[in-house]
Amino acid sequence: MLPRTWAQDVLRCHLCDAPGPPMYCDICHIHLCKACVGEHISDESKEHKVVSFNKRGLTPKCVKHSTQLCDLHCEPCNIPICLECVSSGDHLGHKQVGILKKLDTRKEALKKDLHELENSIYPKYQEIASNLPVQKADLNKNTKKLTTALDKHGEDLHREIDNAIKKLKSDVNEIESKHLVVLDKQENEIKCSISEITQSIADLKKLLNSNDVNFVSAFNSRNAEFRRLPPKLTISLPRFIPQKINKEQIYQQIGSLLALSIKTEEHGYTMDSPGAESSPPDRPLIDVPWIITEINTEYGESKRIRSVSCLGDDELWTLGQDNMMRLYNLHSKLVKSIQTKSENTPVDIAVTQSGELVYTDPSDRTVNIVKNTQIQTVIRLQEWYPLYVCITSSGDLLVVMISNEKKQAKVVRYSGSTEKQTIQYNDKGQPLYSHDDIALPKFIIENKNLDICVADCRIGAVVVVNQAGKLRFTYTGPHSTTKEPFHPIGITTDSQSRILATNLNNCIHILDQDGQFLRYIDNCHLQDPQCLCVDTRDNLLVAENRTGKVKKIQYYI
């Protein structure tokens, strides 16, 4: 009997040679019929993992333990892991998800990337590309119009101005060439980008058809890069300005062409990312910050203001030392007041992306949200007191809390009422945050780069960890300074990922996202600044603890 060719091959059971076996051993890499599965797994000399044929290869082999399959995925390490990896302790405290769930999640992200590329980014690039020939046609039309005007004026000036007319024609052609160079350059760049987008679409489709977890996980999305669309060119076309003929001043009387003007608007075409913020324009710091306006509130010595949070650009939620939370507009008018559900005094407030108010109530051990004047309890704790809170870009809650006996402090991330992450210790097992004084604040904020920043007044430091909870840096004040010791209270961040923190000495420190000191705001006559927030335009709102005033400050150009 002649051996079967590849085209003639039919999948057969490895043990009984039955055709079309529906099962597969992911460890031994052999096909099995249902009748032979029991015989195969009865071999106890090695491990077996028998799955349906359609699900073969979904669980990769562990790179550290070659006899094991990876049923889990470690989120912080971003690698598949097996049960031996888990028991080794290398991934202790790390968030782990099922490998199949990880694959499904990644494929969903790939589908979103593909959908955005095909339905949003790619068509926009095509639209921009289609506009360039129109600009070139307008340029050519204007050039011809200029040439005609120059010819007519040249006939009126006769031989005396022939040389000048020729020069101006040359200037016009040179301007056209310069324009074309700029337009051709952008056209070539856009064509190149379209080609890269087309390749990304093809790669994503290929990944979506693959069950190779390592291959899929290794893919790096370029959508953020493509989302930054090409700069918009605004070209001021030249104009010809004729003069009355004067033979003695012939060259002056002919007129001149306005200089070439090409305006580049870097963000003219910038698109918004679905579910994410677009790249903000650069906003350098000004030399002298100034007060735009002052908001007078009813807070003061009797019920000092403790927390503020912006609701858009025109209103501000405030919190003092009573059980009311008050919303003010920029004209110092009280818009509304809300009493806490427990009638106890809350510690901190934050505003969600949809404009709903969130507050912590340590007396009640709860975190609550106000929806249409109805207060709902989102989180209820047993052995911890929730103190300070912020809303992340993904809509999660970050809550600073302290234990009953005041011996521990930590930051916990919640998605709704579900605990997702705990941040408490550095890599050496030492506490990140102070815990022995509940009266000293620990305001918290998420930076635009997803770092988590806590102003820990007790230890005199801004403690910054990354999204995974790993310590990035601790800022304790600038070096070589004559200012008083650093004791941060309020903290916020702006669109440039800069960190702003108040100090007990009536000034505000501005840092870059890596903890490098940039400058102070110490010229706005601040009196006991307590808490901070920024609006969508990066205007800084500073609440003065004793006076009850909120000062709106511009500190950028």
Image (cartoon, helix red, strand yellow):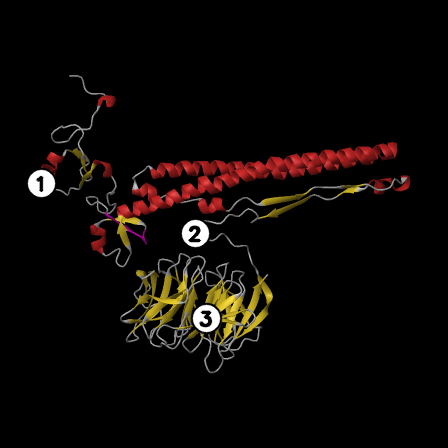
Query: Which three-letter amino acid code belongs to the residue tagged 2?
Result: Gly
Along the horizontal axis of the image, is 67 left or right of 393? left
**With respect to residue 356, does 75 lie above or below?**
above
Which residue is situated farthest in the right direction here? 248
Q: Which label's residue is closer to the chain start, 3 or 1?
A: 1
User: According to the image, label 2 marks what residue?
Assistant: 275
| Residue 269 in view, yes or no | yes
**With respect to residue 365, does 234 lie above or below?**
above
Q: Secondary structure at mark 2?
A: loop
**Rendering coords of residue 333 (x, y %):** 54, 72
Q: Which label's residue is closer to the chain start, 3 or 2?
A: 2
The residue at 53%/48% (across/down) is 270
Numbered badge on residue 42: 1
Along the horizontal axis of the image, is 375 left or right of 299? left
Q: Nearer the viewer, mark 1 or mark 2?
A: 2
Is the residue under label 1 in contact with that under label 3 (CB below 8 Å)?
no
Q: CA distance from mark 3 to mark 2?
A: 28 Å
Q: Residues within 10 Å of mark 1 (few under 14, many from 20)?
A: few
| In the foreground, 305 or 99 | 305
| In the foreground, 329 or 109 | 329
The residue at 56%/37% (across/down) is 129
The residue at 37%/70% (across/down) is 360
